[in-house]
C-alpha cells in the first residue's frame, strides 16, 4: 500500500504547456475520496494514516466545504471539546491532511465513474486536462445541496432577490455583500435560522420565518438563539404561495395551511420585501453514487450503508451528509474517519487476495414505525472486531415529549434500552454498540426463527417494550 509511483502524484505532475495537445494522465491509487469538506478531509486523513495511498478530488479551489463560510461558533464540541468557528474546525483537518502529504486535486470534477473487477475507475477533469483514476475503493463525501423555490412549487416569475440560505451565507460571510434590505425567510432549517441572526446583525430587517410544518425544522437551540433572542417571529403552519416582482422581488404572499399542508382560503397576506431566503431542506448529493450502482435509501435520500460506511456496492463507501443530513459537523467527521479506515482496509484486503473482495455478511437493521430513519441500515457480521464500537444514528418520526424508550435487539436479545426525555425529528440522536456483542446475540439466537436473525430498533414506553 506504499507511496504513489514517481510522477503519479497529481500535485507533482507538470501541467501541459499552453497550446500543447490535450493529454490524459492515468493514476493508480488505493483510495479515492470525492469531496474535501469535513467528511472528505476526515476520510482522507484516516485512510492515509491506515497506510493507503489516497487521492482527494475537490471541485472548489480550497478544501473545507461549507465550513469555510460558517463564521458562527459551535463546531467541535463533541470532537474536540471546543467551540470553534467553521473555518477553525476545517483548518484542523486541512492542516492534518497537509502534514500527511496528501495528493489533492482542486477545481476538479468527476465526468465518469464506473466499477471494475479491481475496484473503481473515475475520469476527472481539472484545469490541466483529464485524469483517469483507478482505485481499490472510493469514498463518497459529496455532501448535500439545498432545495430551491421550484422544488417547493412557489408561483411567480424568477426575479432577482430569491436566495437559498447557503448562498446568502456565502454572500455575506465570504463576499461581504448583502442580499437585500428587507427579507422574509421560507422554512426554518438551521442554515435559515442562523442567517436570520446574521442578516439582522448586518443591518437587514428580517420580517420573520414561515414554516409550513406545525413545528420548527431546525434545532431548538437555534430557534431560541437566532429568532427569539432577536425578536424575529416564527410563523408555523404558514408558507409562501407567490412571489411578486419581475426584475426584483417586491413582495410575497403568505397563507396558513391545514394539517394536510393545503392552503386555507382567506388567510392570504401580502408582505412587502425585496429578498426571499429559502431554508426548505437539504438533499444528499448522490449523482455519482447512482452512476456507480449504489442503492439509495428513500428515507435518507443517501446510500444504504453498514457500520463501516460501506455501501451495498462493493468497494464504494459513503460518509457525512452524502449518507444523511447530520446536525453536527463532528458526526460528519466521525463517519468520514470510519469510511476512510474501512476503505483503506478494503483496498489492502483486495491487494492481498489478488483482487478478491472481502466476504460480507450483511444483516439488516429494521427500524420501527416510530423512526424517520436509522443509519446504518445494515450491520456486517462477517468479521466483527471485539471491542469495536459502531455508531448508530436515528431521527424520530414525530415529536415525543413523554419519555420515549428506544430499544435495540439482536437475535431476540435486548442490547440497548435508553429513555429519552424528548425526541424531535430535527434533532438527530446517536448511540454506540459493540459489533461483537451484536454478532454473538444473533449467533446465540434460535436460527430456526427468522425473527431471531434480525436487528431491530423499537420505540415505545418502557411497559410496552
Image (spheres, rainbow, N blue to C red):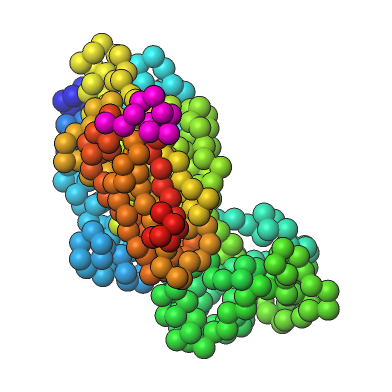
Q: Residue at x 68, y 79 (%)?
A: 273
Can the viewer see residue 347? yes
Of residues 167 and 311, the one nearer the viewer is 311
Q: Residue at x 48, y 66 (%)?
A: 400
How far from the left and from the top, in percent, is residue 336?
31, 45
How far from the left and from the top, in percent, is residue 425?
49, 61
How far from the left and from the top, in percent, is residue 379?
34, 35
Q: Residue at x 59, y 76 (%)?
A: 209
Instruction: Check the image and report above or below for 26 versus 435.
Output: above
Q: Is residue 127 magenta?
A: no
Q: Residue at x 20, y 66 (%)?
A: 81
The quarter of the rendered structure image containing the C terminus is bottom left
Q: In the drawing, does residue 48 fall left or right of residue 157?
A: left
Of residues 276 and 371, the one nearer the viewer is 371
Q: Which residues are magenta?
A: 444-453
Place residue 30 in its image quadrant: top left
Of residues 330 and 143, the one nearer the viewer is 330
Place residue 388 in its image quadrant: top left
Q: In the drawing, does residue 122 fall left or right of residue 213?
A: left
Instruction: Check the image and report above or below for 233 versus 402.
Output: below
Instruction: Check the image and report above or below for 382 versus 174.
Output: above
How far from the left and from the top, in percent, is residue 287?
53, 37
Q: Is residue 445 magenta?
A: yes
- Residue lying furthest front in this view? 463
- Residue lying furthest bottom in this view? 231
Q: In the drawing, does residue 321 fall left or right of residue 2?
A: right
Can the viewer see residue 340? no
Of residues 356 and 129, the one nearer the viewer is 356
Place residue 410 in its image quadrant: top left
The quarter of the rendered structure image containing the N terminus is top left
Amino acid at each position: 500500500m506504499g507511496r504513489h509511483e514517481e510522477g503519479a502524484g497529481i500535485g507533482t505532475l507538470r501541467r501541459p504547456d499552453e497550446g500543447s495537445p490535450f493529454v490524459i494522465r492515468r493514476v493508480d491509487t488505493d483510495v479515492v475520496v470525492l469531496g474535501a469538506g469535513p467528511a472528505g478531509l476526515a476520510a482522507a486523513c484516516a485512510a492515509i494514516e491506515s497506510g493507503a495511498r489516497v487521492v482527494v478530488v475537490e471541485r472548489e479551489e480550497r478544501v473545507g466545504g461549507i465550513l469555510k463560510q460558517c463564521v458562527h461558533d459551535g463546531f467541535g464540541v463533541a470532537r474536540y471539546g471546543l467551540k470553534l468557528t467553521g473555518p477553525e474546525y476545517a483548518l484542523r483537518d486541512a492542516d492534518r491532511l497537509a502534514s500527511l502529504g496528501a495528493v489533492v486535486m482542486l477545481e476538479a470534477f468527476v465526468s465518469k465513474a464506473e466499477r471494475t473487477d479491481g475496484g473503481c475507475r473515475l475520469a476527472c477533469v481539472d484545469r490541466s486536462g483529464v485524469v483517469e483514476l483507478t482505485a481499490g475503493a472510493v469514498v463518497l463525501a459529496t455532501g448535500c445541496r439545498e432545495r430551491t423555490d421550484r422544488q417547493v412549487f412557489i408561483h411567480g416569475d424568477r426575479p432577482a432577490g430569491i436566495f437559498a440560505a447557503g448562498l446568502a451565507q456565502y454572500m455575506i460571510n465570504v463576499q461581504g455583500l448583502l442580499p437585500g434590505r428587507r427579507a422574509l425567510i421560507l422554512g426554518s432549517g438551521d442554515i435559515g435560522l442562523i442567517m436570520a441572526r446574521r442578516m439582522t446583525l448586518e443591518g437587514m430587517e428580517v420580517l420573520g420565518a414561515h414554516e409550513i410544518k406545525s413545528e420548527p425544522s431546525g434545532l431548538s437551540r437555534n430557534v431560541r438563539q437566532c429568532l427569539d433572542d432577536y425578536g424575529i417571529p416564527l410563523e408555523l403552519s404558514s408558507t409562501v404561495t407567490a412571489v411578486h416582482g419581475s426584475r426584483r422581488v417586491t413582495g410575497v404572499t403568505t397563507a396558513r395551511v391545514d394539517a394536510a399542508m393545503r392552503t386555507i382560503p382567506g388567510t392570504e397576506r401580502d408582505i412587502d420585501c425585496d429578498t426571499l431566503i429559502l431554508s426548505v431542506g437539504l438533499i444528499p448529493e448522490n449523482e455519482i453514487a447512482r452512476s456507480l450502482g449504489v442503492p439509495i435509501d428513500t428515507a435518507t435520500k443517501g446510500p444504504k450503508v453498514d457500520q463501516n460506511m460501506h455501501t451495498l456496492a462493493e468497494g464504494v463507501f459513503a460518509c457525512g451528509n452524502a449518507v444523511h443530513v447530520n446536525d453536527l459537523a463532528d458526526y460528519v467527521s466521525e463517519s468520514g474517519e470510519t469510511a476512510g479506515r474501512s476503505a483503506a482496509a478494503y483496498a489492502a484486503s483486495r491487494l492481498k487476495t489478488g483482487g478478491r473482495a472481502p466476504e460480507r455478511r450483511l444483516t439488516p437493521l429494521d427500524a420501527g414505525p416510530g423512526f424517520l430513519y436509522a443509519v446504518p441500515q445494515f450491520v456486517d457480521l462477517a468479521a466483527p472486531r471485539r471491542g469495536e464500537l459502531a455508531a448508530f444514528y436515528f431521527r424520530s418520526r414525530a415529536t415525543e415529549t413523554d419519555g420515549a424508550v428506544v430499544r435495540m435487539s439482536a437475535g431476540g436479545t435486548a442490547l440497548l434500552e435508553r429513555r429519552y426525555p424528548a425526541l424531535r425529528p430535527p434533532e438527530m440522536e446517536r448511540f454506540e454498540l459493540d459489533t461483537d456483542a451484536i454478532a454473538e446475540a444473533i449467533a446465540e439466537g434460535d436460527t430456526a426463527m427468522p425473527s431471531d436473525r434480525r436487528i431491530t430498533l423499537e420505540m415505545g414506553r418502557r411497559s410496552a417494550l
